[in-house]
Image (spheres, rainbow, N blue to C red):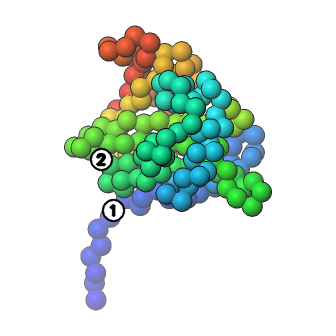
Amino acid sequence: MNIATTSTPVPPPLRWTQTLRDRSQVLIRAISPLDRSAERSFLEGLSAQARRFRFLGQVRSPSEQLLDQLTDIDPEHEVAFVAVVAEGGAERIVGASRYSSSADHQSCECAVTVTDQWQNKGLGSALMKHLIEIARQRGIHRMYSVDLAENLQMRDLATHLGFHVRIDPDDASQVIHELSL
């Protein structure tokens, strides 16, 4: 029997081990509602500056609504990954990336956050590269991020990944990083 097969792209894995520049390893996987407590600890453990850069303002402790939004993902419009390390028999989140697509799936807003101790190891790049690949495979044409203009680490990461930057026309203290997919 001759069975015709169609060639469809293989989706990228939703769980993998990533070796970073310093040879340390993290497990990167899709976030789930079971990560609620770990996500709270991750956000509360960020430096004040990292929280301000991530949320464009001060968020000391995430609300229950924010935790719901960050851990209960709509698989049709959102993708979110966490980078975890084993610590005391549990997983500790050390980085996260996500995107949320527009209703027409033509564009998506993205974000990436890495704890201070895990920055400058290539983790943010690894998280974003995988996110970009998934967005491309899902037919999204444009990815963007709104960031504080003073967030030089995000500027450097975005530039490294090929994003173009422009001043936010609604707020000169912010920039918009855009990538055509």
Direction from residue 53 to residue 138 in the image, left or right? left
- Per the rendering, the mark at residue 139 is 2
Tell me residue 60's x, y (percent).
58, 32
Q: Foreground: 128 or 10?
A: 128
Residue at the bottom extreme, as displayed = 1
In the picture, residue 96 is in which quadrant? top right
Tell me the amino acid under the disc marked 1: Thr
Q: Residue at x 34, y 32 (%)?
A: 180
Tell me residue 56's x, y (percent).
48, 24
**Mark 2 crowd level (few <14, some 14–19, many ≥20, 10 Å Cα):** few
Q: Which residue in the protein does label 1 denote?
A: 8
Q: Residue at x 64, y 34 (%)?
A: 46
Q: Residue at x 40, y 10 (%)?
A: 172
Q: Estimate the spatial distance between the alpha carbons at disc 1 and disc 2, rounded to whole Å.
A: 13 Å
Lower sequence index among marks 1 and 2? 1
Above or below, 120 relative to 171: below
Looking at the rendered image, the disc whose residue lies closer to the viewer, 1 or 2, is 2
Q: Residue at x 59, y 52 (%)?
A: 37
Tell me the amino acid under the disc marked 2: Gly
Q: Are marks 1 and 2 in contact (CB under 8 Å)?
A: no
**Mark 1 crowd level (few <14, some 14–19, many ≥20, 10 Å Cα):** few
- Helix, strand, or loop for circle 2? loop
Direction from residue 160 to residue 163 in the image, left or right? left
Tell me residue 90's x, y (percent).
70, 58
Q: Is residue 119 visible?
A: no
